[in-house]
Amino acid sequence: MTASLPRTPRHRTQPHGAAPQGAPSTGAPLATVPTVGAPQHADRPVPRGHVAVLPQPPPGTRLAAIADHLAHANAPAYRFRQLLAAIARRDVRTFDDVRDLPAPLRRELAARFGPDVLPLRPVAVQSAPQVEKVLFETEAHVRFETVLSRYRAGWTSLCVSSQAGCGLGCTFCATGAVGLMRNLTADEIFAQVMHPHWASGGARLPESVAFMGMGEALANPHVFAALELLTARGYGGLSPRRITVSTVGFAPALERLTREQPHVTLTLSVHSPFPDERARLIPLESRFPLGESLEILDRHVADIGRKTYLAYLLIDGVNDRAEHLDALARLVAERSRPELFHVSVIGYNEAAGADPGYRAPSAGRVRAFVDGLLVRGVRATRRRQFGAAIDAACGQLHARYLLGEPTAVPVHATTREVRARGDRGEGGRANGAGA
Ligand code: SF4
């Protein structure tokens, strides 16, 4: 490899699993791949007739290894572009399906990298109105889940996982109860978005992607390469503004993210304005206190002038009192640009493995908390969530699958069977999880 993907210039969560922030955009999935010229960033439109060289994949990724293999096999450069174009179309599962490539090259790639173009296979699916949750399995049989939400306005949002399980042990989180199995690779994160599973019926790429699935995204260094793949023209081609990274406050990586991907939307999980209480909810508080992450965000919003989000998971009788409202409002008022901090209030859903003492608040209680912030001058909304019937917030499909509970439909089940289960709301109770 001679160069990595272009860096974006610096000018300027309930875990992971609820609806992401921001309005939809079509992004720029590469149906047509540029061929010759200077690298392009996904945010910049390519004028008609302009030609560009595709950036090389980040070193260490499977895509980089494939590009290397093709170069050493003296395959013309356009063969790699043909493979990327097939991934972008999301209509191929195996190398043998990529009919643009000559048969000997298809066989060679399958022999070297295995039959599948992307390193993931869907093994189980749960569906409910407007939401579909897929349990993916890696080539090494590690499992994790991805959730697609379909909004009535016609756009879709994909909630991706960054780790199989999570080692941070937040006490409200189903994924934390599973523990960390391993970080997902950049290719595995990229594959969740580009997987042909989502393309049935000609569906386009999701308008937004949120790192709110299993795992703390910023505890996984491969997330940076994944973001490069997702945003680079010729690969995912998504606008970074349509990607949300949620964190419980992994401060050093948050600082790096604001430097390397300043246009990605950020969500910092607060969940309590009081350090002792927050540490009981999010143990990482004792290592990286909330104030450290807020200072990073202060500098960041002053730099880029764009809104950032504070997530607040509301747990009945735990963090929902007037003193919480007052302290949270003070915390926001102390920011460098308070008008650029938006609080997303999320009602907790009871989660397998979470502290059994935690209870879900009523919808009225969540609304009252949002109103309490508004009257204190804080910009706040209640975050929409889909898929409570299938535990779509995070971690539960995987946790239940491990327990052998028959809540998921094997992926080879017919669409009718999947829909029937979704319509009956099978899949158990709602959960809470993730940052
Ligand atoms: S909330 Fe996020 S960081 Fe905390 S345990 Fe769950 S997945 Fe990990």
Image: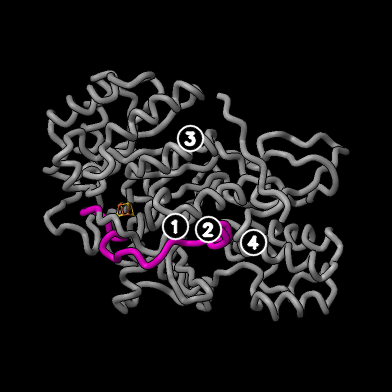
- Magenta highlight on residue 185: yes
Q: Earlier in the sequence, mark 1 or mark 2?
A: 1
Q: How many callouts does the rendering have?
A: 4
**Which x, y percent locates residue 333?**
28, 19
Q: Are marks 4 and 2 in contact (CB under 8 Å)?
A: no
Q: Is mark 3 within 8 Å of ligand 1?
A: no
Q: Which residue is mark 4?
A: 201
Q: Are marks 1 and 4 in contact (CB under 8 Å)?
A: no
Query: Which amino acid, mark 3?
Result: Thr
In the rendered structure, which disc, 4 or 3, sits on the residue that comes first in sequence? Answer: 4
Whole-angstrom CA distance, mark 4 to mark 2, is 23 Å
Name which residue lies at 73% across and 75% down: 109
Q: Secondary structure at mark 1?
A: loop
In the displayed structure, 124 sits above or below 301; it is below
Whole-number angstrom distance, CA of label 3 to CA of label 1: 20 Å
Query: What's the mark number on residue 161?
Result: 1
Q: Are marks 2 and 3 in contact (CB under 8 Å)?
A: no
Is residue 140 visible in the rendered image? The answer is: yes
Q: Which of the two labelled residues, at mark 3 and mark 1, occupies the earlier sequence position?
A: 1
For mark 2, what is the residue?
189
Q: Which residue is mark 3?
A: 258
Q: Would you call the spot at circle 3 few (<14 residues within 10 Å), some (14-19), or many (20 or more)?
A: many
Where disc 2 sits, the SS reads helix
